[in-house]
Image: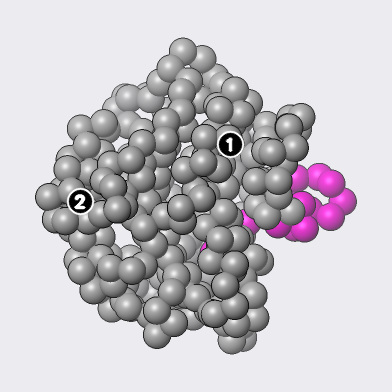
Amino acid sequence: MNYRHAYHAGNIGDVLKHAVLARLIVYFQRKDKAFRIIDTHAGIGKYDLTAEETQKTGEWQQGIGKVLSAEMPQAVTDLLAPWLEAVRALNPDGQLIHYPGSPLLARMLARKIDRLTFTELHPADFKTLAAHFQGDYQVKTIHLDGWLALGSFLPPKEKRGLVLIDPAFEAADEFDRMTAAVINGWKKWQGGTYAIWYPMKDGKAIRRMHEAFVEAGLRDVLALQLNAGKSGPDTRMLGSGMTLINPPFTLAGEMETLLPWLCNTLHLGPGASWTVEAIAGE
């Protein structure tokens, strides 16, 4: 599967990933102390929904497009507010043209004391990413394989923070590489929060990852799924999942409020579902 960010900006997978990322940042900001955000596969930062890549797939129309046009109960409005306010801030005239990828969303939500590290391996994407954040003293952009970042930048000097991991899934062994890198990173920084995103196309690989985490001794592991329909190895992506290590204690309850509404809003056919599952307790 080729999951280069530019072709899929604002899609169903981004809805889950960015809603969760925003909730994590909000939680970390409950304390006055600074924290670090590390994005291992950052992409370009900001996406033009009128560009050739996004127009070719049009996936944002089934993702952020549906979310913004739907009526939502107050509880959902409150939970999505940090993310959606950032999206609206990029589109002040009300027409959805620009979409914040994970790095820009994190930067828009960060306080002056927080720090961000973004790594990207694709040469052209890194050039765009670095140009976007050039001169920003809170942000460090690095042209580097994201799996090496987990070995190089942990633990951060702030001792608080989160690592967002959402690779392109171009390599056949991506889940295995991701699993090994996360376990090695966790051994260096067991107190950090790790947020791992993946498409729901290979259930066996996801289960194998979860089993490896448990066998390695990881604790407090939470798995989320949001499916607009049934995905498989030979279908387009209709759903995604996230596994979180050391999530905020508030997150499971927030997702039990948010995911049913998102599932209903993004529904595309049979197989639409959501889950919040504890893989390993504290």
Secondary structure at badge 1 equals helix
**Quadrant of the frame with the N terminus:** top left
In the picture of the structure, the residue carrying the numbered disc 1 is 258
Pick the front one: 253 or 51: 253
Front position in the image: 160 or 171: 160
Distance in Å between CA atoms under marks 2 and 1: 26 Å
Q: For residue 178, say whether it is visible.
A: no
Please name whichever residue, 156 or 279, is drawn nearer the observer in this view of the structure.
279
Q: Earlier in the sequence, mark 2 or mark 1?
A: 2
The three-letter code of the residue at mark 2 reads: Phe
Q: Along the horizontal axis of the image, is 146 left or right of 184?
A: right
Q: x, y percentage for residue 130?
A: 53, 75
Dot 1 surroundings within 10 Å: few (below 14), some, or many (20 or more)? Answer: many
Q: Which residues are magenta?
A: 86-104
Q: Is residue 261 left or right of residue 93?
A: left
Residue at 64 percent across and 75 percent down: it is: 111
x and y percentages locating residue 2 in the rendered image: 36, 44
Considering only vertical position in the picture, is 29 above or below 169? below
Residue 264 colored in magenta in the image: no
The reply to whether the C-beta atoms of the residues labelled 2 and 1 are less than 8 Å apart is no
Structural crowding at the residue carrying mark 2, measured as other residues with C-alpha within 10 Å and reported as few (<14), some (14–19) or many (≥20) = many
Report which quarter residue 271 is drawn in.
top left
| Residue type (three-letter) at the residue carrying disc 1 | Leu
57 in relation to 10, above or below: above
Where does label 2 land, which residue? Answer: 213
> Which residue: 42% across, 35% down?
276
* Residue extending furthest toward the left: 215
Does any portion of residue 149 appear in the rendered image?
A: yes
